[in-house]
């Protein structure tokens, strides 16, 4: 079955950096686009970044563009999110996501990793 396991979250001061990773299994990773979402307390889950299956096309939410970088390693079935110049408003639980076709389109999520930006 599809499994997504995020890691790398933690507490960081404003202006600091973190690198999140997501280990994927249970599907053909190299054939699927991958996404990072985040959800802050009391807010809806929002899309942060997307990367296509080959890793050649990336898109970002306006709030993180120029600060975050999504990448993937198809040999290791991992997708990462490098987060620089972190701000308190980046505080959220970050989730890895894949959408797959299996008779219907289905979204799969990891358990999430907490990122807290605070001094």
Image: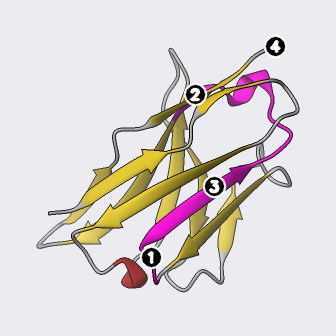
Q: Earlier in the sequence, mark 1 or mark 4?
A: 1
Q: Quadrant of residue 18?
A: top right
The residue beneath circle 2 is 92
Residues marked 4 and 3 touching at CB (< 8 Å): no
| Element marked by disc 2 | strand
* Label 3 environment density (alpha carbons within 10 Å; few <14, some 14–19, many ≥20): many
Distance between the Cα atoms at labels 4 and 3? 22 Å
Distance between the Cα atoms at labels 2 and 4? 15 Å
Instruction: Read off the magenta span.
Output: 75-93
Q: Could you say where residue 80 lies in the image, as x and y percent from the top left?
A: 58, 60
The disc label shown at residue 119, or none: 4
Residue 107 within the segment the image draws in magenta = no
Q: Which residue is at 34% across, 46% downward? A: 110
The residue beneath circle 3 is 81
The residue beneath circle 1 is 76
Q: Could you say where residue 67 lies in the image, as x and y percent from the top left?
A: 83, 49
Distance between the Cα atoms at labels 3 and 1? 15 Å
Above or below, 105 against 11 in this view is below
């Amino acid at each position: 079955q599809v499994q997504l396991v995020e890691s790398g979250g933690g507490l960081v001061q404003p202006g600091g950096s973190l690198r999140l990773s997501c280990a994927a299994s249970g599907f053909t990773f190299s054939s699927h686009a991958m996404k990072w979402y985040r959800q802050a307390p009391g807010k809806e889950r929002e899309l942060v970044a997307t990367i296509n299956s080959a890793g050649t096309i990336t898109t970002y939410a306006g709030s993180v563009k120029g600060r975050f970088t999504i990448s993937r390693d198809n040999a290791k079935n991992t997708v990462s999110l490098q987060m620089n110049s972190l701000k308190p408003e980046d505080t959220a639980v970050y989730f890895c996501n894949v959408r797959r076709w299996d008779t219907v389109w289905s979204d799969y999520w990891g358990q999430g990793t907490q990122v807290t930006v605070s001094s």
